[in-house]
């Protein structure tokens, strides 16, 4: 196997959902922080598309002096993280499809 001396990881706990209580080594980014979201694809037993579990990064806690103790992942079943959102983007609305034109009201 190749030497991965430059790649750093951190044992990060998971809370909630199917991964509750587990600790996994998560690769750190260039700033020394784990990714904001962690996606775990779970294969379907019937051969269908895999289910994706989404976990969101949150602070693990703070010391008495206010120093952050580390990071943990919390289960986010309804999270749509990973979609690129810009500050000027419109909020998601269910009927955000363009119309085909004015409705024909005359019979």
Image: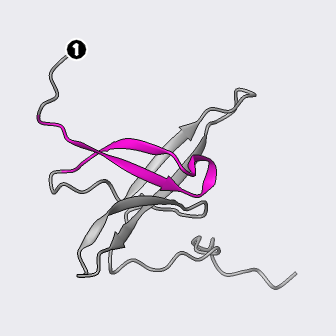
Is residue 23 found inside the magenta-colored segment of the image? yes
User: Is residue 68 positioned above or below 16 on the image?
Assistant: below
Residue 31 place in picture, x, y as percent = 15, 57
Left or right, 105 with reference to 13: right
Asked whether, in this view, residue 102 is left or right of residue 40, the answer is right
Which of the 4 quarters of the picture holds residue 56?
Answer: bottom left
Residue found at the far front of this picture:
64
Q: Is residue 85 visible?
A: no
Given residues 78 and 14, the one toward you in this image is 14
Q: Residue drawn at (47%, 47%), measured in percent from left and top?
A: 39
Is residue 57 among the parts visible in the rendering? yes
Q: Does residue 88 show up magenta in the picture?
A: no
The residue under the point 40% across, 67% down is 58
In the image, residue 10 lies at what x, y percent? 29, 46
Residue 17, by quadrant, is bottom right
Q: In which quarter of the image is the N terminus?
A: top left
Give the total number of marks visible in the rendering. Answer: 1
Can you name the residue that lies furthest to the left here? Answer: 6
Q: Which of 57 and 50 is in front in this view?
A: 57
Find disc 1 in the rendering and name its residue.
Answer: 1
The single residue placed furthest to the right in the displayed view is: 107
Q: Residue at x 63, y 71 (%)?
A: 100
The residue range painted magenta reads 6-29
């Amino acid at each position: 196997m190749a030497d991965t001396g430059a790649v750093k990881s951190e044992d990060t706990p998971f809370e909630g959902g199917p991964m509750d209580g587990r600790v996994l080594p998560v690769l750190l980014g260039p700033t020394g922080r784990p990714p904001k979201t962690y996606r775990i694809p779970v294969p379907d037993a019937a051969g269908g598309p895999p289910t994706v579990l989404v976990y969101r990064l949150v602070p693990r806690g703070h010391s008495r002096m206010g120093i952050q103790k580390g990071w943990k992942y919390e289960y986010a079943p309804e999270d749509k993280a990973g979609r690129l959102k810009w500050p000027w983007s419109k909020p998601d609305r269910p009927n955000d499809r363009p119309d085909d034109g004015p409705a024909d009201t005359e019979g």
